[in-house]
Image (cartoon, helix red, strand yellow):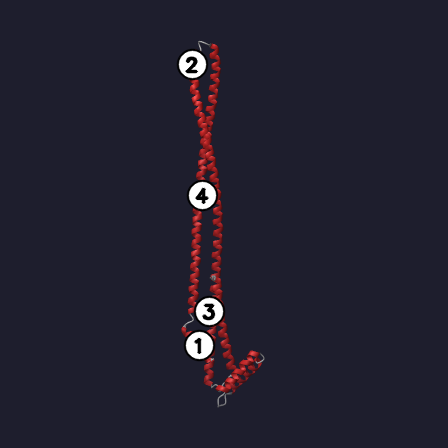
Amino acid sequence: MESKSEYLLKKEAELRRINDELEAEFQRAQMEQDIDYPLSDNKPSKDIQDSYDYEEDEVEDKQEEDYKEEEEEDSKEKQFDTGYYQPQELGALQEDLSEAQSIIKFQKARIQALQEELNEAMSTINDQAQQIENLQGYNQAASEDTKKHSQQLQIMSQNFEKMKKQFNEAQQKNNLLEKQIVELEKENSLLKANEKRSSKDASSRDVRLNRLIEEVERYKNQIKELKANEGDSNEKNRKEIERLNQDNKRLERQKTEILTAFKKQLKLIDILKRQKIHLEGARLLAFTEEEFMKTLELGDKL
């Protein structure tokens, strides 16, 4: 299927061909007028005779070209066959030539107007194509940003899962330490009950108990730090994930808007193309039936 520019160029070539044909018809009619001046039985006036002599000299100059010589020979044979024109026929011929000149002038004006419309349409199409190209570039950049943010969101999710796993492990250790504390407290109670029976054993057990208590406190502090860090990290990760989700939604919304604008631009270009086709069809049909019949009658007379 041919493109819009090819169609418009074809229409322009067709209009130029019609104009060339009309100009050729006009030149042939002018040559016949130059060669076949009417000579009646009555002697023409001096002004008409001088005009005849001038036209004959012009024809003799043009006879240097081959196609002019052939036209002159055909015209001379026509003189012998049909006889000379009368003055009334000369006036009618001049009137037809004047009408042909008017038609040619009108066709040239139409061609110029169509050429201006063609240039305007091509400029509009080029502008729309540039806008589409810009929108495509913006859409591609938005898609790349969306992909990048999706990757960042995936990394943050992985880090969040890792921190969650570490928190669960710390929680398990905390539960184990609490059980040990309960057991140590029971053992401490037993040690205190047996303290009276053996001070030596009590002393060693006190040392062991203190060490265990210190270790328990140390583990408790570690658990508290892990919980605090986990809370801060979770809050930070949650905010970062929310921000990335919002950015992702915003980019998706921009992508949708860009695609919608792109579709609207394509629809607008299609509408402009259709309007241009209808306009050209209407202007071509402006060559009315009456003008067409006049052209045919002029061709018959010529």
Crowd around label 1: few <14 · some 14–19 · many ≥20 (10 Å): few
Q: Amino acid at mark 1?
A: Leu
Task: State the image quarter where residue 64 is shown.
Answer: bottom right
Above or below: residue 190 compared with residue 137: above
Indicate which disc, 3 or 2, sits on the residue closer to the N terminus: 3
Above or below: residue 202 compared with residue 133: above
Residue highlighted by disc 1 = 296
Q: Amino acid at mark 2?
A: Leu
Q: Nearer the viewer, mark 1 or mark 3?
A: 1
Above or below: residue 248 compared with residue 215: below
Residue highlighted by disc 4 = 248
Q: Nearer the viewer, mark 4 or mark 2?
A: 2
Labelled pair 3, 2 in contact (Cβ < 8 Å)? no
Distance, label 4 to label 3, CA atoms, is 56 Å
Q: Amino acid at mark 4?
A: Asn
Q: Amino acid at mark 3?
A: Arg
Residue highlighted by disc 3 = 110
Distance, label 4 to label 2, CA atoms, is 63 Å
* Label tally: 4
Indicate which disc, 4 or 3, sits on the residue closer to the N terminus: 3
Residue 84 visible in the snapshot: no
Percent coordinates x, y for residue 232 in the rendering: 45, 32
Distance, label 2 to label 1, CA atoms, is 132 Å
Residue highlighted by disc 2 = 190
Distance, label 4 to label 1, CA atoms, is 71 Å
